[in-house]
Image (tube, rainbow, N blue to C red):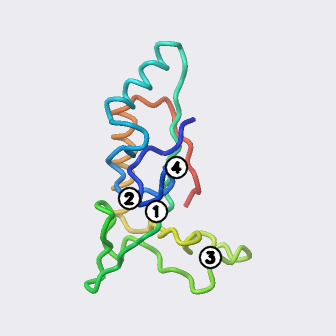
Amino acid sequence: WISPVPENTECGYHGYWASNFFEVNPQYGTKAQLQELVEAAHNKSMLVMVDVVFNHVGPGVNLTADHAYRGYPQFNLTEDYHLPCPRGVNTSNQTSIEDCWLATLPDLDQSIPSVTDTLLVWIKDLIATFKFDGIRIDTVP
């Protein structure tokens, strides 16, 4: 599989720190180039999977006075996220594992219908646009 393709926050060269899910990380090229890559693989009878991250966005959240998250077009409300846990993730507590921020990565709250709906629209669009043959889900929520 290939790394996640969404546009990343600053210093997120690897694909795992999404800022804009519907744009391609320019470090990987353009949307057209990604489509060409998948098509070239298919022409060689190769399948292409893409890694996706549903659990969190990249670090660098800019929480403003009006409680909006700037820099995340799809998830810009405080309600879109779990609250950070003061002591980090407690690996002995399942709720903590599921709801706390992984390091400094804002944790998406999939119990919010708009968050889940947006993620589903994104993944359907990703597969339809780029013709990926499968997905690998990183850090399952």
User: Which amino acid type is shown beneath numbered disc 2?
Assistant: Ser
Give the mark nearer the N terminus: 3 vs 4. 4
Residue 94 percent across, percent down from the top left: 66, 72
Quarter of the C terminus within the rendering: bottom right
Of mark 2 and mark 4, the one earlier in the sequence is: 4
Q: Nearer the viewer, mark 2 or mark 4?
A: 4
Pointer 4: what residue? 14
Question: In the figure, residue 78 lies in which quadrant?
Answer: bottom left
Is the residue under label 3 in contact with that under label 2 (CB below 8 Å)?
no
User: Is 73 above or below relative to 106?
Assistant: above
Q: Nearer the viewer, residue 53 or 62?
A: 62
Identify residue for label 2: 19
Q: Where in the figure is residue 77, as x and y percent of width and height?
A: 31, 73
The residue that disc 1 covers is: 58
Dot 2 or dot 1: first in sequence order is 2
The correct choice, above or below, for 6 with respect to 112 in the image is: above
